[in-house]
Image (cartoon, helix red, strand yellow):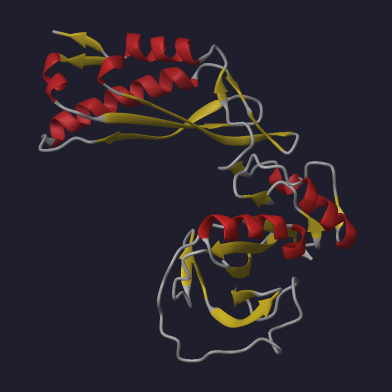
Amino acid sequence: MFIDTHIDEIEWYREHYGNNPLIIIATYTDTLNYFLTVRFDTHHFDTWRFNCFALEFDFLGQTSYRGFRVRVFGEKESVFYSGVKNIQRIENVGCAYGFVPPAWVFVLHNDLSFCKMRTSKVRADEDISDIQRLAERHFKVSNCMPEMHESEIFWAVENFPKFALGEDSLRRLISSNLKLKEEWLQYNFTIWINLYVDKNGKATIKDVMVQGLVDVSNELRSELWYDAQRVAEIISQYEFIPASHRGHKVNSIFSTSFIGSDFVREN
């Protein structure tokens, strides 16, 4: 049923890539959720095991559905299907690896209720109403924000956090506070500041990174990093508009970067 719901999208892949995509189904669990992912491999990689987000999926078997080849990975026993007894097994297939980004991710809580906060289609901001309607026919669906998500940090959301005073004010804040010596102008580099922003708009520093520096001393590298860290601390004191996802305010990540044109130069 899940694939039937999105058969038009499968046809889109067929029209654009000129062949039938291989459908890859993978399931896994963590302490709170059950996950089912669906991918379309239009290149037909010889993929029998693959890694995704630090998870390695074992090949279980393959079958066909409405003219499409289907490969199943992950857990032999899953809440999403009744085992793999009727799926063709292939042994000794080697350990080729590949990565195909998920087209859909369908998630259940560990009580088998539908988890709309973690379910997605291609991107976090895609409409999942058709998936939710399907879930309502077979699983419990809660419209409230489950307590388990209260402290969770969402990396992919419909609306990311924003600096409350606006992007222009943020750039001015950066340029007026980052003090770099003239000698730094000969280098090409980018500074990234990543902040945790909670659902109330309060920010704390996640990390500060300096990229692109080549053949510089550790002393100069440290000098730039510490000044960027100081600017990050200033930014984190300001108010942010929190991220929102599936109708709820959530904890998420705010990222910004700046380069030479943002700097105040001191001689």
User: From what the image shows, is residue 236 above or below residue 169?
Assistant: below
Q: List x then y, in percent, for residue 162.
A: 56, 23
- Front position in the image: 160 or 46: 46
Q: Nearer the viewer, residue 113 or 89?
A: 89
User: In the rendered picture of this protein, how many numbered marks are placed on residues?
Assistant: 0
Vertical order, 226 against 138 (above or below): above
Residue 30 visible in the shown view: no
Name the quadrant containing residue 245: top right
- Name the residue nearer the viewer: 200 or 80: 80
The residue at 13%/14% (across/down) is 182
With respect to residue 265, does 213 lie above or below? below
State the residue at coordinates (75%, 34%): 247
- Residue at 58% of width from left, 62% of height from top? 39
- Position of 236 with respect to 184 (left or right) is right
Determine whether, in the image, residue 78 is placed left or right of residue 54: right
Residue 75 in percent (x, y) is at 63, 76
Determine if residue 172 is in view: yes
Q: Position of residue 154 (x, y in %)?
A: 60, 42
Residue at figure coordinates x 13%, y 8% from the top left: 267
The percent position of residue 258, horizontal first and vertical second, equals 34, 23
| Residue 246 quadrant | top right
